[in-house]
Amino acid sequence: MLNKENFDPSVKLMPASSSIAQSISQDKWSIGYLGLGYTKEGNVKVLNVKKDENTPAVTPNHNTVLDKTYSIARPLFLIFNGEPAGNLKLVFDYALSAEGQKIVEETGYVTLK
């Protein structure tokens, strides 16, 4: 997006997506990059993004993330030191369950399917 250039010195660096969402919702001239879950409330305008000059601009949403047409989506990995066991396995299994994936969807994030 920046053609391998650094951010302008005037760019505000924020510690978390919630800070970015709050900041851009209060300044109509600001722009930020944050997860889809932070756009669910509708207090920020979501912009379409082009992968390159030869492709159409794509709206970030559940479908365009899953089908990989939204070019700047990134996966979230859960990494374990060995097979999850005990309470950790319970949490992991719940996250992958239909009930867990429903919560993912309700909070504005992208489910596995």
Image: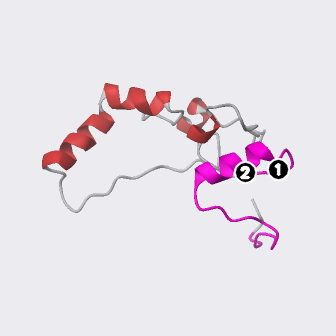
Residue annotated with mark 1: 53
Q: Which residues are magenta?
A: 4-31
Q: CA distance from mark 2 to mark 1?
A: 29 Å
Q: Is residue 59 above or below residue 16?
A: above
Q: Residues within 10 Å of mark 2 (few under 14, many from 20)?
A: some
Hey, which quadrant is residue 13 in on the image?
Answer: bottom right
Residue 16, given in percent of the width and then of the height, sits at 58, 56
Disc number placed over residue 67 in the picture, else none: none
Q: Residues within 10 Å of mark 1 (few under 14, many from 20)?
A: few
* Residue at 63%, 31% in the rendered image: 41
Label 2 or label 1, whichever comes before in sequence order:
2
Q: Is residue 111 above or below residue 5?
A: above
Q: Is residue 18 visible?
A: yes
Residue annotated with mark 2: 23
* Front label number (2 vs 1): 2
Residue 45, given in percent of the width and then of the height, sits at 76, 37
Residue 33, given in percent of the width and then of the height, sits at 68, 52
Q: Is residue 50 visible?
A: no
* Residue at 68%, 47% in the rendered image: 22
The three-letter code of the residue at mark 1 reads Glu
Q: Is the N terminus in the top left, top right, bottom left or bottom right quadrant?
A: bottom right
* Residue at 17%, 46% in the rendered image: 87
Verify CB contact (< 8 Å) between mark 2 and mark 1: no
Q: Is the C terminus in the top left, top right, bottom left or bottom right quadrant?
A: top left
Q: Is residue 65 above or below residue 99?
A: below
Q: Is residue 16 magenta-colored?
A: yes
Q: Nearer the viewer, residue 9 or 3?
A: 9
The three-letter code of the residue at mark 2 reads Ser
Give the dominant element type of the magenta stretch: helix, strand or loop: loop
Viewed as shown, does residue 86 lie left or right of 1? Answer: left
